[in-house]
Amino acid sequence: MSIRSPKQALDAAVEAGRWAPSVHNTQPWAFAVSGEEISLRADTSRQLPVSDPAGRELLISCGAALFTMSTTIRFEGYEPVVRILPDPDRPGLLATIRPGEEIEADELTWVLGGEIERRRTHRAGFADVPIPDQLIESLARAAMREGAKLTPIRSPAAVNVLAALTQAAQGVQVQEQRFSLELIRWSQPPGGARADGVPADAYPREPVPTEPDFPQRRYSWRHGWGIPATRSEASTGVVAVLTTPGDSREEWIATGQALQRVLLHASAHGVSAAFHTQALEMDLLREFLRQELCSGEYPQMIMRLGVTFDSKDVPRRPLTDVLE
């Protein structure tokens, strides 16, 4: 039984929610605590109007924060009671969460909770270390628990298609000023002190191409920022796609919850993820993927999973910035 009060569990949940992954580390969430309930809101001032006009990636990011808070409340000894999109008249209110009945946190909850601040996004190739099939299968089951489907792409031809579409989308985006300016907004120069965005030590200056090549975002934008590439990390890793049957706001939030469950589970086994959303930010390419590679399901995230020995600190906004 819990020895922490519901108020203490809520405080811990809000603190943990800050550590969720988000597109370009925008951290597009706001929390409010009223009584014994947390409200999760979308901070649309942090939305990407060019690459994410519908707010899909924003809601995926907020869904990851929701799962993080739910896990923390369970970790603190309470069953989380969650309502998704509880008020149609308040579309910015994505969810409410409160502590329910007291429970004994199980072993999986302890494992996932222990990875919340340790998990890191990777932005380069991986070490040539195989990932056991059993682990990939367990990650697929983890996603399924949150209403999404994680499919490892085993066919070399299909991996080549995903890489080619990522290259094509990246090639278009780097040529368009509006995409570049949006990316610059979330890029930090070396020594930058911002509490959001992608710092210059979070990606290689000159990436070592994987085979096939999945290009990373060019956060440095002609500045030569970044760190020296790790030549020993040039493996593609395991390519996987996260999909949902539909494409509603509820399913975007569910995607974020599934994504964070997968990432925390993977982190507990020493596995990190690199994300590639370029092709999913272009409607024609996303629809092509849905029809040709995803059996009609909607692709929500393309990722590579692998082992890296490079771990960097990531900036996080202070609690005073995210708690209303």
Image (cartoon, grey):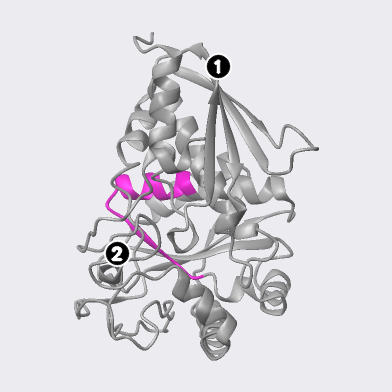
Q: Quadrant of residue 68?
A: top left
Q: Quadrant of residue 116?
A: top left
Work out whether residue 11 can be spotted.
yes
Front: mark 1 or 2: 1
Residue 178: mark in rendering: none
How far is disc 1 from disc 2 in space, using C-alphas? 48 Å
Q: In the rendered structure, does residue 131 fall within the stretch colored magenta?
A: no
Give left or right: position of 40 versus 318: right
Check disc 1 and report its element: helix, strand or loop: loop
Q: Which of 316 and 156 is in front in this view?
A: 316
x, y (%) of residue 165?
Answer: 57, 82
**Residue at horizontal 66%, vertical 58%?**
55
The amino acid marked with disc number 2 is Pro
Near-viewer residue (139 or 10): 10
Residue depicted at 67% across the width and 73% down the height: 286
For residue 77, say whether it is visible.
no
Tell me which corner region of the image, top left, top right, bottom left or bottom right, holds residue 312: bottom left
At label 1, the amino acid type is Gly
Task: Name the element at disc 2.
Answer: loop
Q: Which of 73 and 297 is in front in this view?
A: 73
Segment colored magenta: 260-276
Looking at the image, residue 44 lies above or below residue 83: below
Q: Name the residue under label 1.
A: 35
Residue at the image position 63 percent from the left and 35 percent from the top: 95
What residue is shown with label 2? Answer: 130
